[in-house]
Image: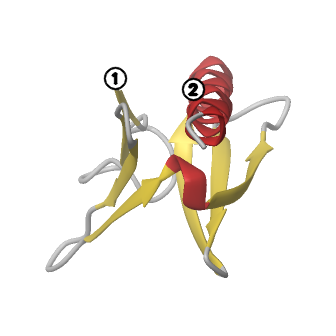
Amino acid sequence: MKYVASRLSEGNKIFPAEIITEESGITIKIPGLFSGDTTTIAYDSISAVEIDTPLIGYSTIRFYHSGNKVEAHGFSKSDVNEIKAFIEEGRSRSRSKF
C-alpha cells in the first residue's frame, strides 16, 4: 500500500514524502528539488518504529534500522498507525519463518 504525505505539511509542498508497504519490507521516498532519498528496509532489520502525533497538525514516523534513523513527516494519524501496525505484522511474520 502507498501512503503519501499531505502537501499542506511542512517540507512536502512540492514533493511530498511517500511510504510504500510491501510483503518483504517498506520503501521510504523523501524527494527533493535536485535529488531525493529512497530507502528500502526489510521488516526483520527494523529495530524500532516511533510515531509523533501532535494534537493538531501532521504526524511524523521514524524507523530505526542497523543503527540508522529514517524519518518522514506529513502523514495523518490514521496513516502512521496503519503503517506501524503493518510493520509490526511484517516483523512477526519474518520472526515466525525461523
Mark 2 packing: few (<14 Cα in 10 Å), some, or many (20+)? some
Q: Three-letter amino acid code at disc 1?
A: Met
| Residue 42 image point, x, y percent | 45, 54
Q: Are marks 2 and 1 in contact (CB under 8 Å)?
A: yes
User: Of the residues under marks 2 and 1, which one precedes in the sequence?
Assistant: 1
Measured in 3D between alpha carbons, the distance from the residue under mark 2 to the one under mark 1, in whole angstroms, is 10 Å
Where disc 2 sits, the SS reads: helix
**23, 18: nearer the viewer:** 23
Q: Write down the residue under mark 2.
A: 86
Q: Which residue of the protein is positioned furthest toward the right in this rendering?
A: 55
Q: Residue at x 56, y 36 (%)?
A: 97
Q: Is residue 36 left or right of residue 94?
A: left
Residue 87 shown left or right of residue 56 in the figure: left
List x then y, in percent, for residue 8. 44, 38
- Relative to 78, does residue 70 appear above or below in the rendering? below
Residue found 44% across the figure and 58% down from its top? 41
Q: What residue is disc 1 on? A: 1
At 65% from the left edge and 41% from the top edge, which residue is drawn?
95
Number of numbered callouts drawn: 2
Element marked by disc 1: loop
Question: Which amino acid, mark 2?
Answer: Phe
Apparent side of residue 24 relative to residue 61 in the rendered image (left or right)? left
